[in-house]
Image (tube, rainbow, N blue to C red):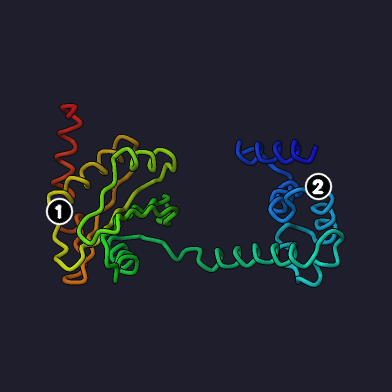
């Protein structure tokens, strides 16, 4: 019976259905109690505390006074509360409003890497970085990402806009023909999904950051992409 109830709650969560507060708390407790009916414990916690937020920020000793809650479960709930606190403190940290801020962000992300890494930053309309996808083969000289992987990232996450960046190890940040090629492919994928493509920056410890946007190279590639779309290439 418990397994059927859990499955129903998982399906509601997966399907994006509205969940009652006690149901959300039950789902959190599933990991703490793999084989126990957590419904009474969730109700007991919400009878003591006015909200899930209060549950997750309650003192460990006080949580332990609730029937069914031991120290390990109390620590588990408190840890989730700490994660929420950390998320709130970081809210707004990764906000990119212009290319200068993006270059600073790229430096912070890629400085000191001994292997080449390619990253995609998925943005909302307010300039917040909502998702980061990082690719690396452990090779100092190259990194490869298939177009279908990029397409999946864009189509599944549906960002408002996309920045991309990668690093050159031990050489100039000037782009190579393969850098131009991946930029064109990503720009085309974004265009086909009605997603804005803002810039591609290349970081190098040798000479800093190269911006496709600031050097007008992005416009050159956009003309290539538009031509390819026009002629179906």
In the rendered structure, the answer to whether residue 6 lies left or right of residue 94 reads right
Report the front residue among 90 and 168: 168
Picture quarter with the C terminus: top left
Residue 27 position, x and y percent, is 70, 48
Residue 95: % across, % down: 41, 61
Please determine whether, in this image, residue 173 is positioned above or below residue 143.
Answer: below
Which disc number belongs to residue 67? none
- Residue under the point 13% across and 46% down: 220
Q: Residues within 10 Å of mark 2 (few under 14, many from 20)?
A: some
Residue appearing at x 85%, y 63% in the figure: 66
Q: Position of residue 137 (x, y in %)?
A: 30, 54
- Which residue corresponds to mark 1? 216
Q: Between residue 85 and residue 35, name the one nearer to us.
A: 35
Tell me the quarter of the picture where residue 86 sits: bottom right
Residue under the image location 42 percent in, 63 percent down: 94
Asked if residue 30 lies left or right of residue 169, the reply is: right
For the residue pair 98 and 222, the one nearer the viewer reads as 222
The part of the image, by quadrant, that contains residue 93 is bottom left
Left or right, 63 with reference to 182: right
Secondary element at tag 1: loop
- Quadrant where the image shows the N terminus: top right
Q: Quadrant of residue 200?
A: bottom left
Mark 2 residue element: loop
The mark that comes first in sequence, 2 or 1, is 2
Give the camera-side residue of 21 and 64: 64
Q: Which mark is in front, 2 or 1? A: 2
Q: Which residue is mark 2?
A: 37
- Distance, label 2 to label 1, CA atoms, is 61 Å
Place of residue 80 in the rendered image (x, y in percent of width and height, measured from the top left): 64, 62
Picture mark count = 2
**Quick one: label 1, few (<14), some, or many (20+) residues within 10 Å?**
few
């Amino acid at each position: 019976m418990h397994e059927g109830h859990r499955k129903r709650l998982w399906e509601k969560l997966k399907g994006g259905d509205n969940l009652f507060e006690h149901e959300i708390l039950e789902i959190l407790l599933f990991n703490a109690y793999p084989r126990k009916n957590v419904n009474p414990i969730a109700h007991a916690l919400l009878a003591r505390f006015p909200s899930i937020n209060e549950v997750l920020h309650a003192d460990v000793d006080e949580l332990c006074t609730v029937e069914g809650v031991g120290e390990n479960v109390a620590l588990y709930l408190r840890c989730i509360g700490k994660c929420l606190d950390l998320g709130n403190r970081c809210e707004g940290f990764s906000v990119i409003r212009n290319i200068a801020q993006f270059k600073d962000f790229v430096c912070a992300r890629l400085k000191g890497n001994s292997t080449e890494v390619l990253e995609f930053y998925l943005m909302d309309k307010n300039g917040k970085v909502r998702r980061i996808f990082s690719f690396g083969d452990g090779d100092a000289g190259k990194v490869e990402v298939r177009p279908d992987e990029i397409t999946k990232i864009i189509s599944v996450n549906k960002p408002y806009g996309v920045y991309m960046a990668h690093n050159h190890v031990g050489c100039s940040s000037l782009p190579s023909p393969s850098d131009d090629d991946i930029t064109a492919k990503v720009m085309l994928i974004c265009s086909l999904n009605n997603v804005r493509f803002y810039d591609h920056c290349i970081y190098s410890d040798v000479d800093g950051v190269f911006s496709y946007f600031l050097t007008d190279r992005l416009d050159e590639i956009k003309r290539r992409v538009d031509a390819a779309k026009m002629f179906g290439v």
